[in-house]
Amino acid sequence: MHYQPRIFVLASCFALMLGCDSQTSSSAPQNIQTLTVTASAYNSIGEQTDEHPALAAWGDELRPGMKAIAVSRDLLAQGLTYQTPVTIEGLDGEYLVLDKMNKRWKNKIDIYMGENTQAAKTWGVRQVTIRWVENQDESAN
């Protein structure tokens, strides 16, 4: 009988710790953003970019097989900043924001397709819905 209260206290503390841990991870607010944008595709070849076709705006080296996108500069203010993971309607996986587009574009993304120009032509230009988790500590433009 003398040990019963201690066991109850220990069991209660353990249950409380488990409850706090699961509440912390599941109740953390995630602000999921959704936006419909125009999506085209691009390749790391000189005709489509500049004299450094594999060099992205923030200094990343693009390589075939990477899941990367460029965003129009107006989307930076909406939270699509450097290295933001984005899902794109119609495509598998997450794409990282690694590049910025020319200032003339608005509400647009460009999907990196390595050196496969046929894949980029097949994609063409279309409207897609993209999703990302808004970063509470926005720091990149």
Image (cartoon, helix red, strand yellow):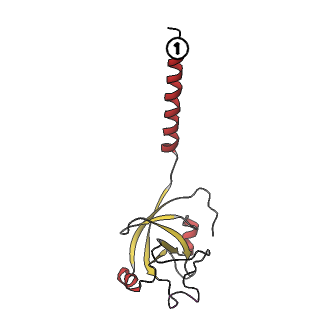
Magenta span main SS: loop
Q: Which residue is mark 1?
A: 5
Q: Nearer the viewer, residue 35 or 65?
A: 65
> Within the image, what quadrant is residue 74 found in?
bottom right
Which residue is rendered at x = 52% and y = 48% of the image?
29
Amino acid under disc 1: Pro
Secondary structure beneath dot 1 equals helix
- Residue 51 falls inside the magenta stretch: yes
Report x, y in % for residue 101.
54, 79
Q: Is residue 78 above or below residue 11?
A: below
Q: Is residue 5 above or below residue 76?
A: above
Residue drawn at point x = 41 percent, y = 83 percent: 116
* Residue sitting at x 53%, y 69%: 97
Which quarter of the rendered picture does the C terminus lie within? bottom right
Please tell me which residue lies in front, 11 or 131. 11
**Farthest-out residue, bottom:** 47
Number of dots carrying numbers = 1
Which segment is the magenta one?
46-52
Residue 24 position, x and y percent, is 53, 41
Q: Is residue 71 magenta?
A: no
Would you say 13 lies left or right of 138 here? left
Q: Residue at x 53, y 64 (%)?
A: 84
| Residue 7, x across and y down, in percent | 51, 18
Label 1, residues with CA under 10 Å away: few <14, some 14-19, many ≥20: few
Q: Is residue 125 left or right of residue 76?
A: left
Picture quadrant where residue 36 is located:
bottom left
The answer to whether residue 71 is above or below residue 124 is above
Q: Residue 9's x, y, as percent?
A: 53, 20
Looking at the picture, tell me which residue is in the foreground, 138 or 16: 16
